[in-house]
């Protein structure tokens, strides 16, 4: 199955800005690898929470639309809140 997620570039980076994003129901993320510059992004929590329940979300290529460009990625790591079940951060790797 193919998944497409709309994302925005993050201009503020750091612990404080990530906390502000989480309070606004956004998920901070980063795309890295393949000798390319890392891209810091953010997207709505509701966009990712339901599709991440499928097993193929972790093993198949995803498409992230960043500023009108499609980027093929794979999930590298995901951090969740200890007991709330919320996603706190996702690392993607260029596919």
Image (cartoon, grey):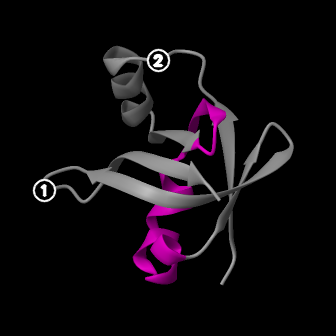
Please state, as top left, top right, bottom left or bottom right, where the N terminus lies in the image. bottom right
Q: Nearer the viewer, residue 23 or 30?
A: 30
Judge whether residue 43 is colored magenta. Answer: yes
Q: Name the residue rendered at 37%, 54% in the picture.
A: 77
Q: Which mark is residue 83?
A: 1
Judge whether residue 93 is colored magenta. Answer: no
Look at mark 2 in the image and give the residue it sits on.
13
Q: Name the residue rendered at 52%, 15% in the picture.
A: 12
Position in image of residue 55 (x %, y %):
43, 83
Q: Name the residue rendered at 13%, 52% in the picture.
A: 82
Q: With respect to residue 9, does 47 lie above or below?
A: below
Lower position in the chain sequence, tag 2 or tag 1: 2
Q: Is residue 46 shown left or right of residue 77?
A: right
Q: With respect to residue 43, does 11 lie above or below?
A: above
Q: Distance from label 2 to label 1 (Cα)?
A: 25 Å
- Specify few, some or many for label 2: CA neighbours under 10 Å numbering under 14, 14-19, or 20 or more: few
Q: Name the residue rendered at 59%, 35% in the picture.
A: 41
- Specify few, some or many for label 1: CA neighbours under 10 Å numbering under 14, 14-19, or 20 or more: few
**Which segment did they paint magenta?**
33-59
Q: Is residue 94 shown left or right of residue 21?
A: right
Q: With respect to residue 19, does 61 lie above or below?
A: below
Location of residue 15 (image quadrant):
top left
Q: Nearer the viewer, residue 42 or 34?
A: 34
Q: Is residue 42 shown left or right of residue 80?
A: right
Location of residue 38 (image quadrant):
top right
Dot 1 falls on a residue whose secondary structure is loop
Circles 2, 1 touching at the beta carbon (< 8 Å): no
Position in image of residue 47 (x %, y %):
57, 58
Q: Nearer the viewer, residue 43 or 89?
A: 89
Nearest to viewer (mark 2 / mark 1) = 2
Position in image of residue 28 (x %, y %):
46, 37
């Amino acid at each position: 199955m193919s998944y497409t997620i709309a994302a925005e570039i993050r201009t503020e980076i750091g612990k404080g800005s990530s906390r502000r994003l989480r309070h606004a129901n956004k998920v901070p993320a980063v795309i890295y690898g393949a000798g390319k510059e890392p891209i810091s992004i953010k997207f709505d929590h509701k966009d990712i929470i339901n599709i991440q329940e499928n097993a193929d979300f972790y093993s198949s290529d995803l498409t992230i639309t960043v500023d009108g460009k499609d980027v093929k990625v794979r999930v590298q790591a995901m951090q969740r809140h200890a007991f709330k079940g919320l996603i706190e951060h996702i690392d993607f790797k260029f596919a």
